[in-house]
Image (cartoon, grey):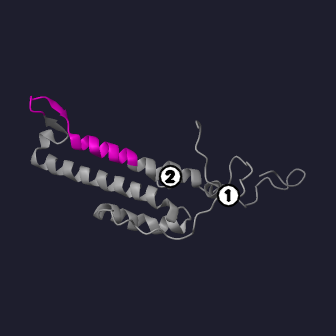
Amino acid sequence: MPGRKPKPTKLKILEGNPGKQRLPKGEPMPDTGMPEAPEHLDKYAREEWDRLAPGLHALGILYEVDRGPFAAYCKAYSLWRRAEESLAKKSESNPDLGMVQVTKSGNIIQHTLLGVANKAAADMVRYAAEFGLTPSARARLAIDPGRGKKSKFEGLIGGKTKK
């Protein structure tokens, strides 16, 4: 089905329902349990899980049903980090060819690890946006700090102003 992905009601509420649309009733709510990290996560993926999962769960964004997509984010993070570290090592040994490699026929091409790192970074950012882990995703969740305060024009002409 083409078009925008529907936004979860919880995120609409956090945003203050900017479109003032009627909020859906009966949206399935996941079990409130904190997901366990999958056993297949490597060291870097597990570090990222342990770094972010508690905070996301406390915000009501990460639940047991979200375990797979969040694990995919953590795996993409791990792959990106390992590829970047490998590129850094290659650059140390040969600074002139850190980002490129020479084929058997003598042609210079982009280093394959650079492609791996770029793809992993793109995947990581795509998954991160689903959990509000990018600046633009957080900006959509920003709560108006002035909400609930009186307007400086309130009471001037005929009573209250609209908010």
Of callouts 1 and 2, which one flags the residue occurring earlier in the amino acid sequence?
2
Q: Is residue 116 magenta?
A: yes
Q: Residue at x 85, y 56 (%)?
A: 155
Q: Residue at x 59, y 40 (%)?
A: 4
Q: Nearer the viewer, residue 151 or 101?
A: 101
Instruction: Determine crowd level at label 2: few under 14, some 14-19, many 20+ residues with C-alpha closer than 10 A.
Output: some
Q: Is residue 123 among what the camera can see?
A: yes
Question: On residue 130, which mark appears?
Answer: 2
Segment colored magenta:
103-123
Q: Nearer the viewer, residue 63 or 114?
A: 63
Q: Is residue 61 left or right of residue 23?
A: left
Residue 105, horizontal then vertical, whole percent: 9, 28
Indicate the amino acid at tag 2: Glu
| Element assignment for label 1 | loop
- Is label 1 in contact with label 2 (beta carbons under 8 Å)? no
| Element assignment for label 2 | helix
User: Which residue is the extreme one toward the right?
Assistant: 158
Q: Nearer the viewer, residue 40 or 152?
A: 40
Indicate the amino acid at tag 1: Gly
Q: Is residue 149 magenta?
A: no
Q: Is residue 45 left or right of residue 129?
A: left
Q: Is residue 107 left or right of residue 156?
A: left
Question: On residue 146, which mark appears?
Answer: 1
| Quarter the N terminus occupies | top right
Residue 68, horizontal then vertical, whole percent: 44, 58
